[in-house]
């Protein structure tokens, strides 16, 4: 038995199967003599795909943790992750002793694409097909290059300046504005969107996907 967590929300019904594809960056080069060589490189980004049901009623086999999350909530979560271009945690929680597949626990991923399917045979239930891709953080602003002059032969003289760490301090409280989510608020003030669970707990918010404009959120 296992459970899937998408951005901290448990899926209502565990997918029947999941495909985990380990990306490839190896490069093959053709030689003059007709042969080939393979240049081995670090693995590419991992891709994960699966289908899951979004039920409109509380079936007996539905994960109990999802009882307070409506079908519309799940649809809104998918839309928010895609429209707001958020990366988020993905986790498959397995029973003790189960085999753990590579690159499937506590990953940061992006929602590459998703499809919502309605079918008469499923009544008002929705089937969501999801494709995720591993997210690797990077920072292109750790240093800046400034041209300060030229040499006698015309070459540029460049000064490299390292970026100083931010001294920004989060306020005690924050008032929610239009378009805000707990994730984006935490990303803005803590540079870590995954802290949204801590902030939700601090404020007694049972459903992190539900905050409203004008609501005052404690950050500390």
Image (tube, rainbow, N blue to C red):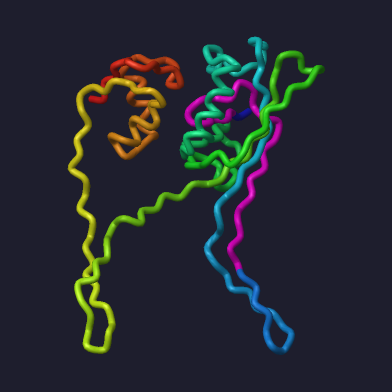
Residue 91 or residue 75, whichever sits in front: 75
Return the residue nearer the eye: 128 or 65.
128
Residue 90, placed above or below residue 156: above
Residue 131 falls in image quadrant: top right
Residue 142 vertical placement versus 218 (above, below): below
Name the residue nearer the viewer: 110 or 63. Answer: 110
Left or right: 166 in relation to 103: left
Residue 23 belongs to magenta span = yes
Residue 51, quarter of the rendered image: top right
Q: Residue at x 66, y 36 (%)?
A: 50
Residue at image x 33%, y 32%?
186
Is 11 magenta? The answer is: yes
Quadrant containing the C terminus is top left
Q: Quadrant of the N terminus?
A: top right
Residue at 26% from the left image edge and 25% from the top image edge: 219
What is the magenta range?
3-26
Is residue 142 shown above or below 109? below
| Whole-percent x, y for residue 188 in the image | 32, 35
Q: Quadrant of residue 195?
A: top left
| Left or right of residue 138: residue 76 | right
Q: Is residue 23 above or below residue 75?
A: below
Q: Position of residue 71 (x, y in %)?
A: 60, 17
């Amino acid at each position: 038995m296992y459970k899937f967590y998408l951005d901290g929300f448990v899926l209502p019904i565990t997918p029947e199967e999941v495909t985990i594809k380990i990306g490839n960056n190896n490069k093959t080069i053709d030689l003059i003599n007709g042969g080939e060589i393979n240049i081995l490189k670090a693995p590419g980004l991992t891709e994960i795909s699966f289908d899951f049901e979004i039920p409109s009623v509380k079936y007996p086999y539905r994960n109990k943790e999802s009882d307070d999350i409506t079908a519309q909530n799940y649809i809104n979560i998918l839309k928010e992750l895609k429209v707001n271009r958020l990366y988020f945690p993905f986790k498959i929680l397995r029973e003790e002793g189960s085999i753990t597949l590579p690159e499937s626990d506590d990953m940061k991923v992006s929602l590459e694409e998703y499809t919502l399917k309605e079918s008469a045979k499923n009544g008002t239930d929705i089937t969501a097909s999801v494709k995720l891709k591993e997210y690797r953080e990077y920072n292109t602003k750790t240093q800046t290059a400034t041209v300060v002059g030229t040499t006698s032969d015309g070459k540029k003289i460049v000064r490299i300046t390292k970026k100083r760490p931010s001294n920004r301090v989060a306020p005690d409280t924050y008032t929610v504005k239009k378009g805000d989510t707990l994730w984006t608020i935490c990303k803005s003030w803590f540079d870590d969107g995954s802290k949204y669970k801590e902030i939700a707990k601090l404020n007694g918010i049972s459903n992190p996907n539900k905050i409203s404009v004008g609501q005052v959120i404690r950050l500390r």
